[in-house]
Image: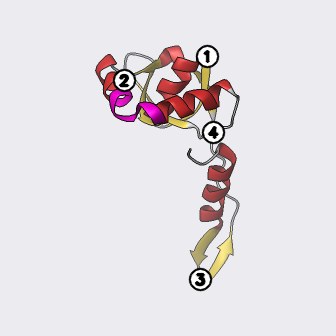
């Protein structure tokens, strides 16, 4: 399965610590990233997209569903607000489908503009 939320955050923090300046590398605290809990009922995916992903990657989605049911840490998804309300999935379609199948009400997400 993919990296856990914690290990992906640590990798991201490590990659942002070193900033070049004046010929020497300075260490700088990473920018605080906002993770939000979003109701899955507000996340839009077309039925055709869901059907396509289930047909192609059903085993992976099933592993994610089991992980959600066992309260394992999962990498957050990336969502973009829709003009008419709700969110489109930019990254994490498999995780969104699995979370919906597992009956999870909310999912951790990074909201981008």
Q: Residues within 10 Å of mark 3 (few under 14, many from 20)?
A: few
Q: Earlier in the sequence, mark 3 or mark 1?
A: 3
Instruction: Determine the secondary structure under disc 1.
Output: loop
Q: Earlier in the sequence, mark 2 or mark 4?
A: 4
Q: CA distance from mark 3 to mark 1?
A: 49 Å
Instruction: Determine the secondary structure under disc 2.
Output: helix
> Which dot, 3 or 4, sits closer to the camera?
4
Check if residue 57 falls in the magenta segment.
yes
Find residue 105 and name its label: 1
Residue at the spot x=56%, y=46% of the render?
2
Residue 106: percent from the left, percent from the top? 61, 21
Q: Which of these two is toward me, 33 or 91?
A: 91
Q: CA distance from mark 2 to mark 4?
A: 27 Å
Q: CA distance from mark 1 to mark 2?
A: 18 Å
Q: Which of these two is toward me, 76 or 84?
A: 76
What residue is shown with label 3?
22
Q: Earlier in the sequence, mark 1 or mark 2?
A: 2
Instruction: Determine the secondary structure under disc 3.
Output: loop
């Amino acid at each position: 399965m993919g990296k856990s939320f914690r290990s992906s955050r640590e990798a991201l923090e490590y990659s942002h610590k070193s900033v070049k300046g004046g010929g020497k590398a300075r260490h700088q605290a990473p920018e605080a990233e906002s993770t939000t809990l979003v109701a899955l009922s507000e996340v839009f995916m077309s039925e055709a997209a869901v059907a396509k992903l289930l047909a192609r990657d059903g085993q992976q989605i099933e592993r994610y569903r089991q992980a959600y049911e066992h309260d394992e840490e999962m990498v957050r998804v990336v969502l973009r607000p829709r003009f008419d309300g709700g969110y489109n999935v930019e990254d994490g379609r498999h995780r969104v489908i699995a979370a919906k199948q597992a009956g999870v009400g909310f999912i951790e997400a990074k909201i981008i503009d």
